[in-house]
Image (spheres, helix red, strand yellow):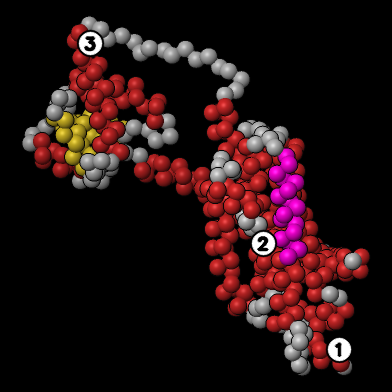
Amino acid sequence: MMGFFHSAYVIARRDFVATVWSRTFLFFLLGPLLVIGLSFLFGSMSGRMARQDVHATVAVVATEADFTALAAARERLNPGFATRPLPTLLREAPAGEPSRQVETLLSNPGKRILAVLTGSLDRPVLTGAITNEGSIQKQMSLIVDQARQQRALAAAGGAGPPVAIQVVETDRSEGALAATRAITARGGQLLLFMLTVLLAGMLLSNLLEEKSNKIIEVLAAALPIDAIFLGKLLSMLAISLVGIAVWVSGALAALALWPGQAPGLPEPAVGWPLFILLVLLYYSANYLLLGALFLGIGSQANSVREVQTLSMPVTVGQMLIFLLASFAVGAFNSPLGLGAAIFPFSSPLTMVARAAQTAELWPHALALAWQALWVWLTVALGARLFRRNVLKSGGGQGGMLRRRKSA
């Protein structure tokens, strides 16, 4: 057994040194930082432009008194729609035939009017490229109803300033705590998923060069195939952890230069120190599980074209696993939650979300042991398939490895 782990260590050290001390590793480290920075820049710019493009403007053909009532009603209701503000109201004085004026307003490219409100407060008519059950119709109905109610109260002499609700703050409430911890849970899941998608896919082509150069035959003649697979898997995990350490250091440096820019996440149920440790452990388990699977699949490929063909179904499979784990957030004891925790390839994502929402620790020890068992089984299965299908040393006559040993 010690010889097996020593062989795995030799392969891991060889691959780690060859990768980290290469010039291309610098581009590997800088590439994601550049992509993430440009994504945030363009995402912020496009989001701002999109909000400007989709914000609705409704022209109101009404008297000064009616428009003042509608504008006051909108100002009173708008704070309740902070994420998607109510339509902007633009007053147009009645002029000529109402239908012709509506057509002129809707066809004016400079004003970019989505709909036109005509008629009185008692009989409003909304005309535009909208539906009867759409959000614009519902929002304008709220504004008109609010304006009519304020007018009725003013006529009855009972209108007054809005009632201010007194707020009594408490340290915590279970409903708010569960909702905020769900944000941390989904954030942890997304972090593990993105890092694994970014880094584990390289294992599909890890053995391709050595197969094409016949180096794998020399290694297989000297070392167990299982040790070669495990060593390559551990070396890629170590390389990914080096990359993550560099990226985290860059993020911390950016936060030190621009304090107050990072969004705050609610504290997880197990506390931040233990949660960070569990995130690292579950990332390693997730990487080893999917990496062992990818290494076994990629070891069967004979060309770069086959690896490229395999990359699409592999990515789709990762997205389905992430979707399964996402459904289990907040429902860990349900049949779906238990199934996602037991299924080895979705277990790390499910359990990291559990760490954010529940304080129990014993399920994590059980889950990590279960995931380690499946890493071992996946590595053993991949090595056996590689030995039988590629090296042809599982009992057939005249295999590559058998011929080399005979020579």
Furthest-right residue in view?
Answer: 2
State the residue position of label 2: 290
Q: Secondary structure at mark 3?
A: helix
In this rendering, the label closer to the viewer, 2 or 3: 2
Q: Position of residue 403 (x, y in %)?
A: 81, 92
Q: Position of residue 284 (x, y in %)?
A: 73, 54
What is the three-letter code of the residue carrying label 3?
Ala
Furthest-left residue in view?
Answer: 97
Marks 1 & 2, CB-CB < 8 Å contact: no
Q: Position of residue 118 (x, y in %)?
A: 16, 32
Depth check, front residue: 220 or 130: 220
**375 magenta-colored:** yes
User: Callout 3: few (<14), some (14-19), or many (20+) C-alpha neighbours within 10 Å?
Assistant: few
What is the three-letter code of the residue carrying label 1?
Lys
Marks 3 and 1, the one that precedes in the sequence: 3
| Residue displayed at 55% across by 28% down | 176
Q: Secondary structure at mark 2?
A: helix
Q: In this image, 204 relative to 72: left or right?
A: right
Is residue 53 shown above or below 163? below
Q: Secondary structure at mark 1?
A: helix
Q: Position of residue 2 (x, y in %)?
A: 92, 65
**259 magenta-colored:** no
- Magenta residues (range): 361-377
State the residue position of label 3: 154
Image quarter hosting the N terminus: bottom right
